[in-house]
Amino acid sequence: MNLGTCHDCSAVGAFVNGLCRDCIEARNEAFRKARAYFSSNRGATARRCSEETGVPISLITSWINEGRLRAAVDPADQDLDADAREQRRQAEMRKAFAEKLGQMPAAAPAPAPTSTPSRGMYRKERS
Ligand SMILES: [Zn+2]
């Protein structure tokens, strides 16, 4: 066990997953709240769940990413998801790169190999 500070409340101690016992309990409670909200509000978005339950949206979206919760997809919520943002950015870069490649003249064919086939230990022209 390593000493550390709690990710949520900065208490110092030996914690599993960087959270003190109180904060793990608080997160479990928040999870139960969010799960209860989604089960009685099917199709609700993470943002709406956060507004209604007071659970931080970052927690809700991480639970959704972990597959522990299911929420309706809201483009505004997706913006909060760093992974999705990074994937979109990479897709845009790939697209821009592909367009750039399309504007470039076709690459010249590779020159034919110029080496003379050798026979045995000596090149043909030396024999
Ligand atoms: Zn804590």
Image: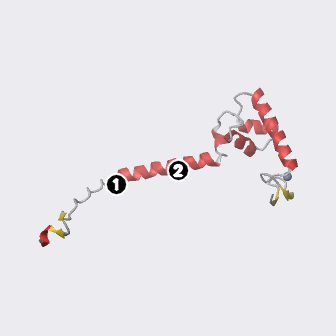
The quadrant the C terminus occupies is bottom left
Residue at 86% in and 58% down: 13
Label tally: 2
**Which residue is tagged 1?**
104
Residue under label 2, please give it.
90
Distance Cα–Cα, label 2 vs label 1: 21 Å
Could you say which is closer to the camera, residue 17 or residue 70? 17
Q: Position of residue 24 (x, y in %)?
A: 83, 46
Q: Earlier in the sequence, mark 2 or mark 1?
A: 2
Ligand 1 contact, mark 1 (Cβ < 8 Å): no
Q: Secondary structure at mark 2?
A: helix
Q: Position of residue 68 (x, y in %)?
A: 72, 37
Name the front one of labels 2 and 1: 2
Identify the residue at image location x=69%, y=39%: 64
Residue type at mark 1 is Met
Of 26 and 88, the residue lying toward us: 26
Whether residue 52 can be seen here: no
> Considering the image in quadrants, where does the N terminus appear?
bottom right
For residue 85, side relative to residue 109 (left or right): right
Q: Residue furthest bottom?
A: 126
Regarding mark 1 in the picture, which secondary structure is present there?
A: loop
Indicate whether 94 appears above or below 71.
below
* Residue 81 % position (x, y): 65, 46
Across and down, in percent, residue 114 comes to: 20, 64
Callout 2 environment at 10 Å: few (<14), some (14 to 19), or many (20+)? few
Residue sitting at the far front: 120
85 to the left or right of 48: left
Is residue 107 depicted above or below 30 in this figure? below
